[in-house]
Image: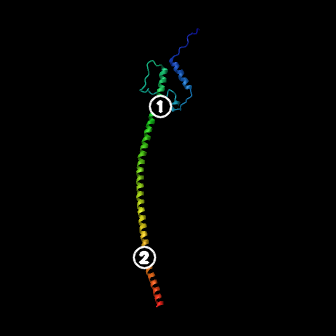
């Protein structure tokens, strides 16, 4: 039994299996997903490469796989960013609707404030009118009191004058 002195030749398929086994041994740093628990044979097939990339001639299988994995992660992030943009547009639409509703409320507030001003003016004029009427009534009462009191005073004075005249004369 003679052993060969040549070093073992590594096959690319064996090397990929070893790398895959090493990756499976690593702890997962990312959040687990339902597809992480399914066996590899049941998982959905990988998506095709995005249109903006293409493998170069001469790239190794490991390089291709690594590049594909990285570009898929970037593509997933890009789709998440686009989804965020869609959400942002929805929020902007909600803000615009709130702005329109706010403008309607502001117009209603302006109308209410104007009605308050008109009511204040009406009450102001009414109070002044009542004040003038009250002053006129007081003046009329004072004049009537003077008319009522004046003849009594004249009669009292004339009776005093008659008494004096009688006493003197």
Secondary structure at numbered mark 1: helix
* Mark closer to the observer (2, 1): 2
Q: Is residue 44 visible?
A: no
Is 66 drawn above or below residue 120 in the view shown?
above
Quadrant in which residue 118 is drawn: bottom left
> Which residue does the image show at 43% across and 48% down from the upper left?
102
Is 162 drawn above or below residue 77 in the view shown?
below
Q: Is residue 36 visible?
A: yes
In this rendered view, identify the residue nearer to me: 103 or 140. Answer: 140
Quadrant in which residue 136 is drawn: bottom left
> Which residue does the image show at 54% across and 25% down from the upper left?
23
> For mark 1, what is the residue?
77
Secondary structure at numbered mark 2: helix
Q: Position of residue 161 (x, y in %)?
A: 46, 86
In this rendered view, identify the residue nearer to me: 39 or 148. Answer: 148
In this rendered view, identify the residue nearer to me: 90 or 100. Answer: 100
Query: Is 118 situated left or right of 13 in this image?
Result: left
In this rendered view, identify the residue nearer to me: 128 or 52. Answer: 128
Q: Where is residue 108 in the image (x, y as percent from the top left)?
A: 41, 52
Marking on residue 144: 2
Q: Distance between the residues labelled 2 and 1?
A: 98 Å
């Amino acid at each position: 039994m003679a052993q060969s002195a040549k070093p073992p030749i590594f096959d690319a398929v064996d090397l990929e299996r070893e790398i895959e086994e090493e990756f499976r041994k690593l702890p997962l740093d990312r959040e687990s997903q339902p597809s992480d628990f399914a066996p590899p044979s049941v998982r959905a097939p990988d998506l095709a490469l995005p249109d903006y990339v293409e493998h170069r001639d001469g790239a190794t299988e490991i390089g291709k796989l690594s590049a594909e994995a990285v570009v898929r992660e970037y593509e997933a992030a890009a789709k998440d960013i686009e989804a965020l943009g869609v959400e942002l547009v929805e929020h902007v639409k909600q803000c615009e609707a709130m702005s329109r509703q706010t403008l309607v409320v502001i117009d209603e507030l302006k109308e209410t404030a104007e009605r308050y001003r008109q009511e204040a003016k009406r009450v102001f004029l009414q109070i002044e009118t009542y004040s003038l009427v009250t002053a006129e009534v007081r003046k009329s009462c004072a004049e009537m009191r003077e008319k009522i009191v004046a003849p009594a005073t004249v009669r009292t004075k004339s009776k005093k004058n008659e008494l004096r005249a009688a006493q003197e004369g």
